[in-house]
Amino acid sequence: MRFELTTAQEHSHALSMSRKRILFMAESITLAQIVRLRVLAGALDPMRYEVHFASGHFPQLAFSDTQFERHELTVLDPKRAANAVAAGRRLYDSKALERYVRADLDLIERLRPEIVVGDFRLSLSTSAELAGVHCAVLINAYWSPFARDQTVPVPDHPVISLLGERLTERYFPKALPRAFEHFAAPVNEVRRRFGLEPIGSLRQVLTHATTTLYPDHPGLTPLDAAPTNHVFLGPVLWAPNLPMPELRFEHAGRPLVYVTLGSSGRIDVLDKVVRALGGLQINAVVATAGRISVRSLPSNVAVADFVPGNELARRASVVITNGGSTTGYQALAEGTVVLGLPSNLDQFLASRAITAAGGGVEVKARTLTQTALTGALERCLRDTELRAAAQRIGHSFDEYDSSARFENWLQATCG
């Protein structure tokens, strides 16, 4: 018996010594920043890789079936971050980022990973460079300095209430270079304090790493002349492991519309959305992500906190989203038309890529009216060209298995 125990211990020790240690670090301002890394981490072979995951919190929906070693990470409060975005302020100052760098370094030095992979952890490329560790960042390709389309839509910003839509649209492009430098300045300042060269403007800061990983399809978000360390993985798709809700509608044969504004959409527009849905010959499922209680629910609308989004997208004729890539790509993967209601800049950039490819329609959340939403939704339901484009995009997604491509990249990088 003792021999068997010793043998088992030796086998376990040999296994731990042979496995490559990978550290994932999520800023976790939005749920997407957690679950994208969780999907990639969860697909790794546990016999080959020892996975460590650092985040501000670990939602039960995403981590209930994982065996990762977890590490608490100091992160921004999501509500504070949302308020800063809405006000057009920077998320971090240089003092906060310096604390982040020191916390990152402490964790990296304790774990000594082969590779560290981050999602919107703006301190990480600096920390990894100081520690001499290979750093990969996950960032959508529409943020890349090599993105073919470098124009930037106007997001929700307090200045719109002062200048109006027309003047803001006119002057926003002129102010953008200075604004991007302003948002990148704390990162560059912290790098100088640690004796490193500054990176550049916001696009450079967001994508700076040993390897830049894009959770997109290159046909949807094309790049020009990107270096070889910029790698397309394909869409990273996640849905909670939940049963389908019981859907008992009076008119069961109507088209189904799936609605979710995620963890970062303009939740204040949801009442308008629900009222518009109630006036149409459709059935709808609204997922609130636990952010709001919907009042005065029409008989053709069902509500839940969370649902299996991939299954709902598969059954739906249209998916209404916050415009962002997470649910937008989930819908397109099922060949379903997207109706985006973007508010922040990331959502506008993703929504523009989807609409430019013909797979969806956009209505700005800040100008949303019940009439505008009804018209856009009716178009999405009847437009055969939109449906064909969404299906074509979905088929193209099949060419890019993000988890397989990530593990292939990992094997090529560290064995």
Image: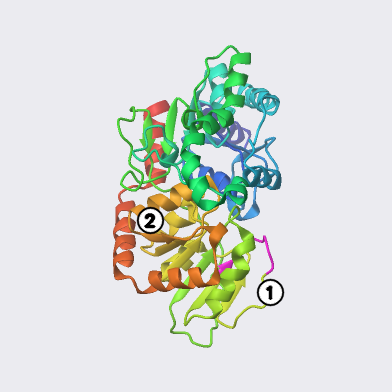
Q: Residue at x 63, y 33 (%)?
A: 2
**242 to 118, vertically: above or below:** below
Name the image quarter holding the C terminus: top left
Span shown in magenta: 286-293
Q: Is 289 colored magenta in this rendering?
A: yes
Q: Earlier in the sequence, mark 2 or mark 1?
A: 1
**263 to 336, vertically: above or below:** above
Q: Which residue is mark 2?
A: 355
Q: Is 230 colored magenta in this rendering?
A: no
- Residue 13 appears in the picture as rendered: no
Where in the figure is residue 44, as x and y percent of width and height? 46, 41
Q: Which residue is mark 1?
A: 295
Of helix, strand and loop, which one carries label 1? Answer: loop
Q: Amino acid at mark 1?
A: Arg
Number of marks: 2
Q: CA distance from mark 2 to mark 1?
A: 31 Å
Q: Residue at x 41, y 51 (%)?
A: 352
Q: Residues within 10 Å of mark 2 (few under 14, many from 20)?
A: many
